[in-house]
């Protein structure tokens, strides 16, 4: 199995908690536009989108077909007395046409909208997302099934079940490492009060695939509301409100590779000349003459602390047993590799004993285990960042990948039997 979109969950951590907010909840539906600079409380110009009885969820998405200037159009989805409806508005609205109703999706209890897209740098060297032509819309039907579709394309796809509320956002995507992609994220609350998410990520072959459903494990309360956001330092965040009114923030690690600093290029033609500059010589002991022929070769050592799993799979150990060996490949070779740097756990968080790790090819390694035939569900292999180094001799940061093992044969564990009973 190719692992190219790391689990957001593995990077989520509890960022902050605030005191309970006991104020009565209100619904204020408005559109805010930022002015050119922050001067005072009038920083935002607020415009009401719609106001009528029976308005439920509302969500907007900005279509941007170029990395500069204003967005092209605003897309919107909302619930009107139990029916999901859509609208658009040109931006800027030079003709003052306002919001134009589009189509009805059907009965729904929660909705969200989000554009997929790619980050591009504009002439001011600022990153801006360039979106697809049409957005994704997400809607929870009255039977609590979460569906998505692409705008007015009537072909819908089931994303999750037992859902009560949904939100969506486009997370950061690296412009250098294409598979470093937080993806288009759909986060939702289920009827059990837990928060889950799935993200639509780009794979190495360019295809878009929905990742498996994952729970925000760091949250243990009963969720009643949530929202999503991205930060200016290339993180994605989830905000969750529990039934006591407490707010929890979960923030991912940065996904900034190649984005914080403008890229440079060094180019050379086949005919390369090396020019030596005369240096000042200081006589210390006696005159010396050194003759040497020069053969230059330039190699750049990989010195970043970033690495990630590319492929992970369990294999036959030669005796028909698929529970003893795993092979994996990584983006960059690991030097000074040590078995203590790795751990293997299944979906129950049960660990399995790793006996040895052997390099079998360029960026490819074999893991020898005592036995993991009893592993259940998705298996996670984690590199702890304790010993393994890059070419330049620096340690890598922690990273992990997941895979679904195949052909495992669980070992029978006998039920304990009573050997003797006595009283004293």
Image (tube, helix red, strand yellow):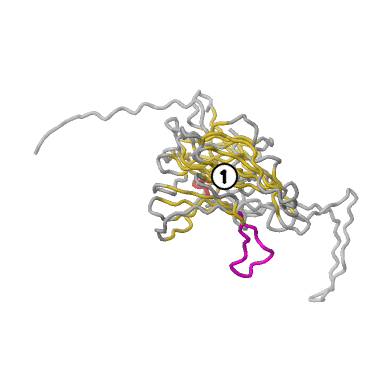
Residue 385, placed above or below residue 327: below
Q: How many marks?
A: 1
Q: Could you say where residue 412 lies in the image, as x and y percent from the top left?
A: 36, 26
Q: Nearer the viewer, residue 54 or 181?
A: 54
Residue 316, placed above or below residue 256: above
The answer to whether residue 130 is seen in the rendering is: yes
Q: Which residue is mark 1?
A: 168
The answer to whether residue 334 is seen in the rendering is: no
Q: Nearer the viewer, residue 350 or 146?
A: 146
Q: Could you say where residue 262 lies in the image, as x and y percent from the top left?
A: 74, 57
Task: Give the residue furthest to the front.
Answer: 52
State which quarter of the image contains the C terminus: top left
Graded by Cα atoms within 10 Å as few (under 14), some (14 to 19) or many (20 or more), the crowding at tag 1 reads many
On the picture, is 134 further left or further right than 188?
Answer: right
Q: Nearer the viewer, residue 20 or 267?
A: 20
Task: Give the residue furthest to the left.
Answer: 424
On the picture, is 254 further left or further right than 178?
Answer: left
- Residue drawn 66% across and 40% down? 362
Q: Nearer the viewer, residue 33 or 120?
A: 33
- Residue drawn 67% across and 38% down? 204
Image quadrant where residue 366 sits: top right
Q: Is residue 317 magenta?
A: no
Tell me the element at label 1: strand
Q: Could you say where residue 260 lies in the image, as x and y percent from the top left?
A: 68, 57
State which quarter of the image contains the N terminus: top right
The residues colored magenta run 31-46
Q: Could you say where residue 266 lies in the image, as x and y percent from the top left?
A: 81, 54
Q: Is residue 33 magenta?
A: yes
- Residue drawn 69% across and 54% down? 259
């Amino acid at each position: 199995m190719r692992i190219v979109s790391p689990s957001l969950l593995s990077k989520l951590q509890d960022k902050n908690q605030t005191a309970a907010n006991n104020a009565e909840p209100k619904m204020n539906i408005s559109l805010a536009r930022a002015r050119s600079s922050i001067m005072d409380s009038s920083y935002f110009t607020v415009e009401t989108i719609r106001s009528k009885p029976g308005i439920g969820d509302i969500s907007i998405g900005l279509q941007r077909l170029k990395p500069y200037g204003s967005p092209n159009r605003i897309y919107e989805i909302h619930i009107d007395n139990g029916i999901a409806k859509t609208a658009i508005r040109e931006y800027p609205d030079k003709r003052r046409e306002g919001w134009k109703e589009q189509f009805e999706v059907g009965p729904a209890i929660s909705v969200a909208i989000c554009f997929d897209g790619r980050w591009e740098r504009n002439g001011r060297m600022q990153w801006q997302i360039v979106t697809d032509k049409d957005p994704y819309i997400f809607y929870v039907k009255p039977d609590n099934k979460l569906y998505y579709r692409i705008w007015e394309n009537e072909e819908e796809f089931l994303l999750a079940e037992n859902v009560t509320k949904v939100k969506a956002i486009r997370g950061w995507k690296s412009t250098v490492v294409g598979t470093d992609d937080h993806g288009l994220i759909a986060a939702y609350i289920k009827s059990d009060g837990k928060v889950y998410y799935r993200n639509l990520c780009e794979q190495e072959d360019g295809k878009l695939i929905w990742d498996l459903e994952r729970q925000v494990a760091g949250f243990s309360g009963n969720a009643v509301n949530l929202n999503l956001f991205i930060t200016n330092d290339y993180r994605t965040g989830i905000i969750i409100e529990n039934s006591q009114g407490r707010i929890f923030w979960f923030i991912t690690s940065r996904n900034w590779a190649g984005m914080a600093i403008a890229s440079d290029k060094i180019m050379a033609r086949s005919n390369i000349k090396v020019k030596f500059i005369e240096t000042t010589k200081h006589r210390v002991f006696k005159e010396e003459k050194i003759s040497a022929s020069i053969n230059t070769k330039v190699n750049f050592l990989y010195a970043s602390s970033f690495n990630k799993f590319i492929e992970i799979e369990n294999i036959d150990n030669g005796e028909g047993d698929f529970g003893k060996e795993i092979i994996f490949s990584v983006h960059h070779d690991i030097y000074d590799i040590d078995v203590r740097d790795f751990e293997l756990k299944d979906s129950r968080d049960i660990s399995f004993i790793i006996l040895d790790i052997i390099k079998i090819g360029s960026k490819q390694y074999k893991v020898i285990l005592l036995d993991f035939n009893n592993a259940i569900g998705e298996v996670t292999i984690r590199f702890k960042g304790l010993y393994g180094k890059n070419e330049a001799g620096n340690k890598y940061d922690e990273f992990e990948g997941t895979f679904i093992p195949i052909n495992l044969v669980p070992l029978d564990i006998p039920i304990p039997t009573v050997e003797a009973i006595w009283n004293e």
